[in-house]
Image (cartoon, grey):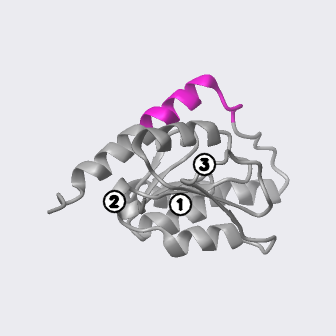
Amino acid sequence: MSTEESGPPIYLDADACPVKDETYRVAARYGLTVYVVANSVLNLPREPWIVRVVVGSALDAADDWIAERAGRGSIVLTADVPLAARCVKAGATVLAFTGKPFSEASIGMTLATRDLMQSLREAGTITGGPAPFSRADRSSFLSALDRAVNRILRERPAAG
């Protein structure tokens, strides 16, 4: 089964991803291929539509692998803002693990906020960390991924 026939490929930035199982559930429902990209070997379900991609330990190797393949009609799942920016620029649908979409309209401000927070941390300012991942985040992610898949499937030209 090719991804062109079944629907959009999903590229999952899998290191420290809290929504792997939810991603697999949505992908199974729609018959999609999930590329699970990580710097090390992860335990994955043995399904033909789940593709393990181990990129090694080089800095940004997983990001580079995903960004080189992401484009219009694909879905990228990541918490990495610079990766999200690259994939949005390539035309991919990009979601954070909380379900928040990254878009052309929002990515500039998101990058600026990330850079500001990084500068504050480097200067020794205590900024706290992200809120703990919640059940509501998981639910929002599931809904957002389902909407993204349906939108891409509606936008595809009919075969024939």
Which of the two labelled residues, at mark 1 and mark 3, occupies the earlier sequence position? 3
Residue 78 percent across, percent down from the top left: 59, 53
Does label 2 or label 1 sit earlier along the sequence? 2
Asked if 132 appears above or below 66 in the picture, the reply is above
Neighbour class for label 2 at 10 Å: few (<14), some, many (≥20)? few
Distance of mark 2 from mark 3, alpha carbons?
18 Å
- Judging by the rendered image, the residue that carries numbered circle 2 is 5
- Residue drawn 43% across the image and 33% down it: 143
Amino acid type shown at disc 2:
Glu
Which label was assigned to residue 84?
1
Q: Nearer the viewer, mark 1 or mark 3?
A: 3
Q: Tell me residue 121's x, y (percent).
A: 79, 54
Residue 136 highlighted magenta (yes or no): yes
Magenta stretch in the rendered image: 131-144
**With 114 as the anchor, is 87 left or right in this view?**
left
Given the image, on which type of amino acid does mark 1 rest? Ala
Question: Residue 146: where, in percent of width, then height?
Answer: 40, 38
Number of on-image labels: 3
Relative vertical location of residue 95 with respect to residue 41 in this rendering, above or below: above
Dot 3 amino acid type: Glu
